[in-house]
Amino acid sequence: MAQEAVRTATPALSPRPQKYLERPDQLCYHGPSSENDHPSFVSKGPRSSENGHPSFVTKASDVLRTTRPALSPRPQKHTICESDDDNDGWGDDKNDQSWQPPDNDTHEESSSDSTSDNDDDRPLAQLNAESQRKKIVRLKTSYTFSKDKFVPVDSDFVPEQITPDPSSDRTPYEYLKLFITDKMIEDLTVETNKYSLEKFGEESKFATSEIESFIGIYYSMGLVKMPKIADYWKIGLRYPSIADAMSRNRFQKILASLHFVDNNTVTEELKEDRVWKIRPWIESLRGNFAQVSNTEFQCVDEIMIPFKGRSLLRQYLPKKPKKWGFKLWGRCDASGFLHDFNEWNVVLQLCSSLERDRGYKIFADNYFSNFNLAVEMKNRGFQYTGTVNKNRLHNAPLESDKDLAKRGRGSYDTVTLKEGDLALLKWQDNKTVTMMSTYLSAEPLTKVKRYDRAQKARIEVDRPAVITVYNKNMGGVDLLDMMCTLYKRQIKGRRWYLYIFYHTLTICVVNSWFLYKRDCQINGVGKALPLKVFQSQIAEVLTKKGKPARPVGRPSLNSPPPAKQRAYAAANQPDVWYDNYDHFPMAQPKRNRCRYCPNGYTQWKCGKCNVFLCLSPGAEPRNCFLAYHKK
């Protein structure tokens, strides 16, 4: 009895506040606060009941979610939200912003106070709270379905003007400069010098040419990988393309000083952005990627950047090959070109830069797909197609998985919304796949081969049109990820934002290569350069253009003697020929064929371009050296 008395006298602990599950299925629109404000889209949505009204507390578990202590509201624009599941409550915002259910008395007081002509007597906190209060629009949660045949939508695509101009003859270096501009390099150099002075207490005086050489060295390291960064300068392992471009100490000094924003001038409001450390670089890249014209088919998917250090942005995805890292979201076309990306999972925001009513087709997976999103995309002039989870079908009368399995592989079932603006399809392959689309359904059917264990042979089965189109155009982001992993160098460090920076450098090269392949296809070029050669030419130009031809300083006593070079050593890229920097003729002991004129032999060689060029006076003077270095 005494023990029971003690237990009953012990005060009950307050329930631990739980985080709201992040579910992007419902769209809740919050109207603009002024005429100039435009709606944007974030991951947060209300809990909805069957009759369409917001349901804030319906059971004991909901009481725990609503008792979470509210954080101070951050000023932000009114938004349209995406949520992930029909039957879930409010999602946990990426900014870790809490929500509290409104009180009926509060609404009555605010409505009565709004009629008052004078707000001077009202508390400032109340005015601020009312300005931050969101106007929730009730959403449709019940749908009527029909077995009528879905009528395909006339969705002819109106193409944009192709930009940049594919007819211009660009080098790989010039393709890269479309995305990493000189202005970006200058800004990076300024902030790197500021941070170096703040960190080391002395001016490093980095030049823009050194930052370009640093980027070129990073690209070269991705092509020729060694266990450690210092191995590229070690005796016996020395790699001339890197070691001759920059000393090891200078490279490590730049690596330790890279910075993108001034820490002393950034405001607390800007620090609310969790990627403020690299935000100027990201926004510049997004603007440059947006200059490339969009194609008809666009897909939205995740981009994983491997990272195991400490950061609030780091996520753990156990089913991914790289389980730890940063997750970005990107919009690519079918060829893999990345048109836009951000750090939040918002389909509508990624598609906001597309012109409406041009007939763009958007593809996404079951993480995003839901009825509200598909209808909203159609209202904006886009056509949406994607896989969908079974718990988001709103009890659509589709055949069960067992019934489709009995009918055999290739069987399918379709239903449409009564309004006729959305089609649902379930198809039996090895497993059942459920699709939704605003402009496609089952017809026309195509044949696809599958292996049949009973017959021990490959047989043909029917495949609906929506499956065919989805498989063809959904893999753009996956193709980009695959190409980025081929020739990317991993440089370890404690600063998390450098991992994002290195990955964006790789994306820029891959995007440049995709754009180069597009132009080759338009211009009828037979065979395009592979990515490895394309990246090596960019690295060579970045490390040599506008730089001295020979390393500065005397060689150390332990340096090996220079290797004997062949007569026809590899020449530089055209971007280096015309930089008008450090091109001098050097006399050679043996003559060789001139690189410019077909029948000339000369003993003069350009020390930077590494080619023999005629430079002979006399009755018939020839100056191939000057002609070779002019466009």
Image (tube, rainbow, N blue to C red):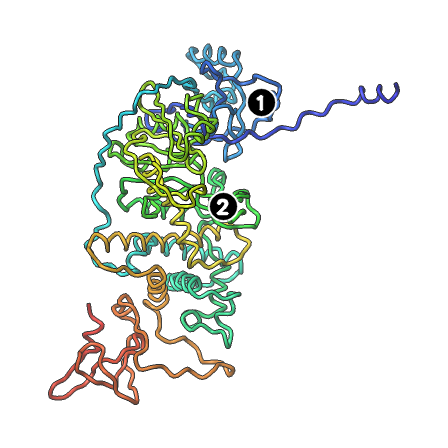
Q: Name the residue carrying label 1.
A: 66
Image location of residue 137, percent across then percent down? 41, 19
Image location of residue 603, percent across then percent down? 25, 86
Q: What label sits on residue 506 in the rendered view?
A: none
Separation of marks 2 and 1 at Cα, in angstroms: 30 Å
Tell me the quarter of the image containing the N terminus. top right
Image location of residue 428, percent across then percent down? 41, 33
Q: Nearer the viewer, residue 180 or 166?
A: 166
Image location of residue 170, percent across then percent down? 24, 59
Q: What label sits on residue 326 in the rendered view?
A: 2
Q: Residues within 10 Å of mark 1 (few under 14, many from 20)?
A: some
State the residue at coordinates (51%, 76%): 235
Say left or right for 546 vs 188: left
**Do callouts 2 and 1 mark residues in contact (Cβ within 8 Å)?**
no
Tell me the quarter of the image containing the C terminus. bottom left
- The residue type indicated by label 1 comes to Thr
Helix, strand or loop status at disc 1? helix
Q: Earlier in the sequence, mark 2 or mark 1?
A: 1
- The residue type indicated by label 2 comes to Phe
User: Is residue 343 visible to us here?
Assistant: yes
Q: Quadrant of residue 219?
A: bottom left
Examine the rendered structure and indicate whether residue 613 appears above or below residue 47: below
Examine the rendered structure and indicate whether residue 177 appears above or below residue 439: below
Say left or right for 296 vs 399: left
State the residue at coordinates (48%, 23%): 46
User: Is residue 288 visible to us here?
Assistant: no
